[in-house]
Amino acid sequence: MKAEKIYHEKEPIYFSYSLNEWQLSYTKRRSTIVENSEGAENQGKSKEMLRSTFTRELLRARDCKPEECPKIVTGFDIGRSYEGRLIRGLKLSFKSGKKSIFIESNIHAREWITSAACTYLIMELLFSKNPDVREMAESLDWWMVPVLNVDGFVYSHEKERLWRKTRRPAANSDCVGVDLNRNFNFKWELKKCEDPCSNKYSGPYAQSEPEVEQLTNFINNNISEDSLKIYIALHSPAQAVLTPWTHTKIPPRRYGELMYVANAFADALYTRYHTRYACGNSGNMLKMFSGGSKDWAYAAKRVPIAYTIELPGKGRPSPFELPEKAILRTSAEMLDGFIGMIKAVKQLETTLISHRIRPMACIWSR
Ligand SMILES: [Zn+2]
């Protein structure tokens, strides 16, 4: 079957999938947003209309007319997946002239908690009245792609819950899918996996997959190097904050500062439910690999602060299938972690500048 056909026959609203997971235990008012979006889809409206409906609903829920604050929420897409689905994202920008943070999640299809938590983060950045959240939200421009691997995500919902890769058939093999987090163009060949049947197949060459190519093109074309200061890749279930590198145990430059910020995330997160995230460089914490998005952002894009944040699940009988009650809890903790992390970056920047030392990222200072 042609990829385009699959797309036209069936495109689920993956934002809604994520929202549906946590809205069950969330407020009625916010679930209305999802119902309205689904309603638009059912009536056969175009994707563009659906996107603007979603955006309008978000703005309305924030008691703000689109014409009065037209640039807070901007829907975007980075392009289409192998099967032809739009890969959507949202940009939140409360004030002009801010540096950027980019958050990518659900690159691994079965890690559903990542897009649920990412969606929760979006909603809190928009609606929360907590002064800490407001300060964080308004101090950066937020670029977020809640579901990057849309084909795999749909497949994990409809066919095989624990599917991890994309859905592109491999050449000269009966196996399907590439691990997108092994396909980025930074030292790809160093620790590549060449077995198309492996769950960690790196693809035939670096950046061979449309999802990776379009994400990197989108960032290259839309967010200037001077603007992009923080890159976060959301994963599960290792319950950890991981710095570069993934291909070596030798830590990167300014590892001490990166660890200071990582620990601030973990410490802030710990307060709410005493969940302990581990911190360290990926190469020490996980089995080494290459071609991951965080290392690409850190090295190829020169984003000074780049982490993989692994949400919980390890130790459970089925680490990727969190019970419903864990979704809100995990998301709320993650929000605490982000607040702690951004505060630490600010604090570090101020302290180093006061000592006439250049910080790893100049986000709020010139
Ligand atoms: Zn993952």
Image (cartoon, grey):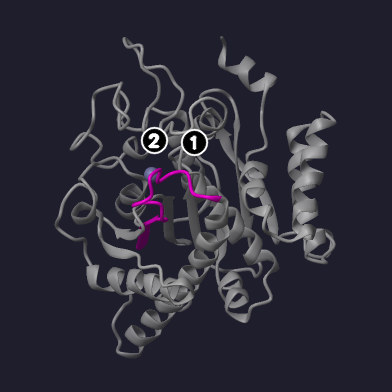
Q: Label 1, secondary structure: give it.
A: loop
Is any atom of residue 145 visible in this view?
no
Q: Position of residue 176 (x, y in %)?
A: 40, 20
Relative horizontal placement of residue 101, taking residue 180 as reference (left or right): right
The quarter of the rendered structure image containing the N terminus is top right
Name which residue lies at 46% across and 73% down. Answer: 342
Residue 359 appears left or right of 42: left
Q: Range of the magenta residues?
A: 303-323
| 350 versus 270 height, above or below | below
Q: Residue furthest front?
A: 317
* Residue 222 visible in the shown view: yes
x, y percent for residue 8? 68, 20
User: What amino acid is at disc 1?
Assistant: Asn
Task: Kindly check if marks 1 and 2 are in contact, taking CB atoms under 8 A apart as contact.
Answer: yes
Q: Secondary structure at mark 2?
A: helix
Q: Is residue 258 left or right of residue 15?
A: left
Determine which quarter of the picture holds residue 195.
top left
Does 170 lie within the magenta span?
A: no
Quarter of the image where one finds residue 175: top left
Please name whichever residue, 241 or 103, is drawn nearer the observer in this view of the structure. 241
Residue in view at x 37 percent, y 46 percent: 293
Q: Would you name the residue on which mark 2 appears?
A: 180
Amino acid carrying label 2: it is Leu
The residue singled out by tag 1 in the image is 149
Query: On residue 271, which mark appears?
Result: none
Q: Earlier in the sequence, mark 1 or mark 2?
A: 1
Looking at the image, the residue that sits furthest to the bottom is 354
Badge 1: residue crowd in 10 Å (few <14, some 14–19, many ≥20):
many
Q: Is residue 128 above or below residue 74?
A: below
Figure quadrant of the C terminus: bottom left
Q: Does residue 80 sit above or below 328 in this rendering?
A: above
x and y percentages locating residue 38 in the rendered image: 77, 39
